[in-house]
Amino acid sequence: MLLSTMPRPILATIHTAALRHNLARCRAQTLDSRLWAIVKANAYGHGIERAFEGLRAADGFALLDLDEAQRVRALGWRGPVLLLEGVFELRDLELCSRLDLWHTVHCSEQIDMLASHKTNLPHRIFLKMNSGMNRLGFTPERYRSAWTRLNALPQVDEISLITHFSDADGERGVSEQMAVFSSITKDLPGERSVCNSAATLRHSEFASDWVRPGIAIYGSAPDFPEHSAAEWDLQPAMTLAAKIIATQDLLPGDSVGYGSTFVAEQAMRIGIVACGYADGYPRVCPSGTPVLIGGLRGRTVGRVSMDMLTVDLTALVPAGFGTEVTLWGRASNGAVLSIDDIAHSAGTVGYELMCALAPRVPVLVEA
Ligand SMILES: *Cc1c(COP(=O)(O)O)cnc(C)c1O
């Protein structure tokens, strides 16, 4: 028999109030656009069920996975649910009919499937244009004939018009893609949806009927480091925190961790933290990556290992066994360490870190 045990001292917290705040923040960017809360990838690692309460003021939920769509319906959500990649095979359309899922149509194969789908309830479609990203969608040249073909199908109800920007977060911006999209769709009826988080924040003049913020509602800046989450008034929706489970006193010349990549130049005290790459903390983060130790800014030393990482306690005298270490998010004293700072140290983006929170980490939902 297994004894009931205390978990390892590591915890992820999902902040419902922060989700609510960030959603309102995105909404405030637009005049009267409706807002899809993007909850693909299990709500960017936060968990659809855990994030739902904080996001229920959205006008709809958009995602990729049919399983995730069923989970949104199982939560009692009766409003719009949009499949951002549409269906993958014919029988997916049955679920769309049954659960009233709206779906993207981005290729002619998906029109073929709709044409052979038997339903009494015509589907709401978001017809996707490839306006320059060259991932999903009909090219501008083929877009109008796709619209005409769809519009003639009895299986199709209203058709909305959608495209996705490749550079809304950067220098290139959205004007070229927007010009293509506008000119091709000019006289077509239907609602428009073009803006992801970066475009909602930086190019809100294009907000149109529906905006599609993802990363911003989880409290990460889509255009970091040009802007920080704090500059956009976004709050972290996820905190990853652990405790110090041991300390060591080092002499000059002593090294830390695998590969001895960090060597003490003077006497120092270090803390061993119960969080490693098997929890989702990136192994590539070098010595010097920021952390909050008892809510005060500190740094890591040495390599991140599977279950542990190491922090410098030398200047943080009262810190020791049991002290809270915040890897990202909000510390107990209210101090914030943005996930974007850690992502930057790891050479990646906040998206990847939040999506990679490991299943072994216990998660608490905070009201
Ligand atoms: C993921 C996704 C979004 C959200 O992007 P963010 O950068 O997280 O705001 C919007 N639209 C589509 C089609 C997407 O796939």
Image (cartoon, rainbow, N blue to C red):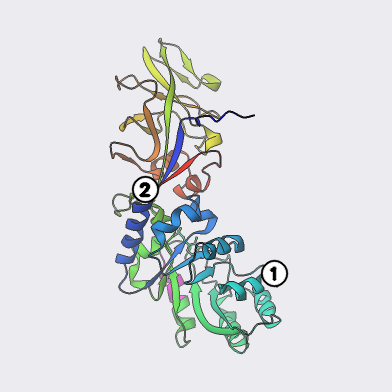
Inspect the magenta stretch and tell me whether residue 178 lies in it.
yes
Between the residue at mark 2 and the residue at mark 1, the CA separation in whole angstroms equals 37 Å
Q: Residue at x 65, y 75 (%)?
A: 110
Q: Earlier in the sequence, mark 2 or mark 1?
A: 1
122 falls in the magenta region: no
* Residue picked out by circle 1: 89
Looking at the rendering, the stretch of residues picked out in magenta corresponds to: 172-180
Q: Quadrant of residue 57?
A: bottom left
Q: Secondary structure at mark 2?
A: loop
Secondary structure at badge 1 equals: loop
The residue wearing badge 2 is: 236
Quarter of the picture containing the N terminus is top right
Q: Nearer the viewer, residue 367 or 329?
A: 367
* Viewer-closest of 265 and 357: 357
Q: Is residue 66 above or below residue 280?
A: below
Residue depicted at 32% across the width and 70% down the height: 30
* Residue 49 at x, y percent in the picture: 49, 55
